[in-house]
Image: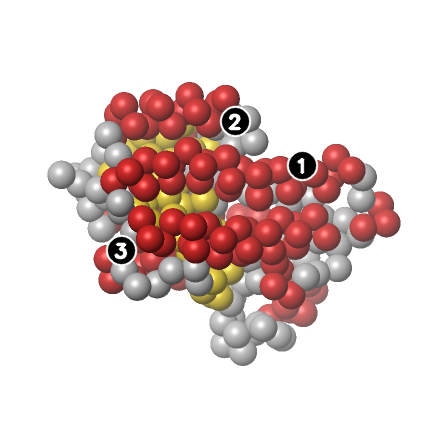
């Protein structure tokens, strides 16, 4: 029987690349998206490709605990198990802290950090009983370095790293592993909209002299979910071409 991965926030960008990577490796894939998306069936087919796997998309707001419980129940009913969880859902609301309102701060923290907690809490219980599982949390290099204009985002991503390490210490004895990935500047639809001047400034600080691709993050996410990383726990893997 195929193993199953759940990837949150996987309708595009890094999440989509991760979902597709797992499907290409023979995993059944459940993935979530938050905004109404008339093309979601096309995304499902893109993830599935030519692979003989089951792929289902679920609309979910990860900050809504009751909704998380409902959707997770549906996923377990359909797939029976979740062997790997990738917490990728996240948002940004960038602005200088002087202009940042409480709702700007907490909406980002509640989605990025709170959403990771909400889903992990539900999935880790079943993994603990099964005494196997891997949970991968998508953080960011900004959670390590901080960044002007991203107080909310930096706090949420730093929290994810600390949360990952704490979970890893709690559940390691149950053979459930927690690791984080901290991507640097990865080319996606969102980053492509940035001004060229800003891209040039970022590129000047990347030792490999190029931006990363979503598939390069997906490769690390698959490694951390596979048996090949069976002794890797509580780590944060930086995928940034050497920015920090």
How far apart marks 3 and 2 lie (CA) works out to 28 Å
- Say which quadrant the N terminus sits in: top left
Q: Residue at x 43, y 25 (%)?
A: 69
Q: Earlier in the sequence, mark 3 or mark 2?
A: 2
Structural crowding at the residue carrying mark 1, measured as other residues with C-alpha within 10 Å and reported as few (<14), some (14–19) or many (≥20): some
Front-lying residue, 176 or 14 = 176
Separation of marks 1 and 2 at Cα, in angstroms: 15 Å
Q: Answer with mark 1 or mark 2, whichever residue precedes in sequence.
A: 2
Q: Quadrant of residue 198?
A: bottom right
* Residue, disc 1: 107
Q: Tell me: 165 left or right of 92.
A: left
The image's mark for residue 226 is 3
Q: Is residue 91 left or right of residue 36?
A: right
Q: Residue at x 65, y 65 (%)?
A: 145
- Helix, strand or loop for disc 2: helix
Residue 177 marker: none
Label 3 close to label 2 by CB (< 8 Å): no
Q: Nearest to the eye among marks 3 and 2: give it.
A: 2
Q: Secondary structure at mark 3?
A: loop
Look at the numbered discs 3 and 1 and tell me whether their residues touch, using CB distance below 8 Å: no
From this view, report whether residue 33 is shown above or below residue 87. Answer: above
The residue where tag 2 is placed is 65
Residue 94 picture location, percent across and down: 71, 48
Image-quadrant location for residue 143: bottom right
Q: Nearer the viewer, residue 197 or 147?
A: 147
Does label 3 or label 1 sit earlier along the sequence?
1
Residue 147, given in percent of the width and then of the height, sits at 70, 61
Number of other residues with Cα within 10 Å of mark 3, as a class: few under 14, some 14 to 19, many 20 or more? some
Q: Is residue 232 above or below residue 94?
A: below
């Amino acid at each position: 029987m195929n193993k199953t991965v759940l990837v949150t926030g996987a309708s595009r960008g890094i999440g989509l690349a991760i979902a597709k990577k797992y499907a290409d490796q023979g995993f059944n894939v459940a993935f979530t998206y938050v905004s109404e998306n008339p093309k979601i069936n096309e995304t499902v087919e893109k993830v599935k490709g030519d692979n003989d796997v089951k792929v289902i998309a679920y609309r979910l707001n990860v900050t809504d605990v009751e909704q998380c419980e409902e959707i997770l129940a549906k996923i377990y009913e359909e797939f029976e198990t979740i062997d790997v969880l990738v917490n990728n859902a996240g948002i940004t609301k960038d602005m200088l802290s002087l202009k940042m309102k409480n709702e700007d701060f907490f909406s980002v923290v509640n989605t990025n950090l709170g959403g990771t907690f909400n889903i992990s809490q539900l999935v880790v219980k079943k993994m603990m009983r099964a005494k196997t599982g891997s949970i991968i949390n998508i953080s960011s290099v900004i959670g390590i370095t901080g960044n002007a204009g991203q107080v909310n985002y930096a706090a949420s991503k730093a929290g994810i790293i600390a949360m990952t390490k704490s979970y890893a210490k709690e559940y390691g004895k149950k053979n459930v592993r927690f690791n984080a990935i901290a991507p640097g500047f990865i080319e996606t639809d969102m980053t492509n909209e940035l001004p060229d001047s800003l891209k040039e400034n970022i590129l000047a600080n990347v030792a490999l002299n190029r931006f990363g691709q979503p598939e390069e993050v997906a490769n690390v996410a698959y490694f951390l979910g596979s048996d090949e990383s069976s002794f890797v726990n509580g780590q944060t893997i930086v995928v940034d071409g050497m920015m920090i």
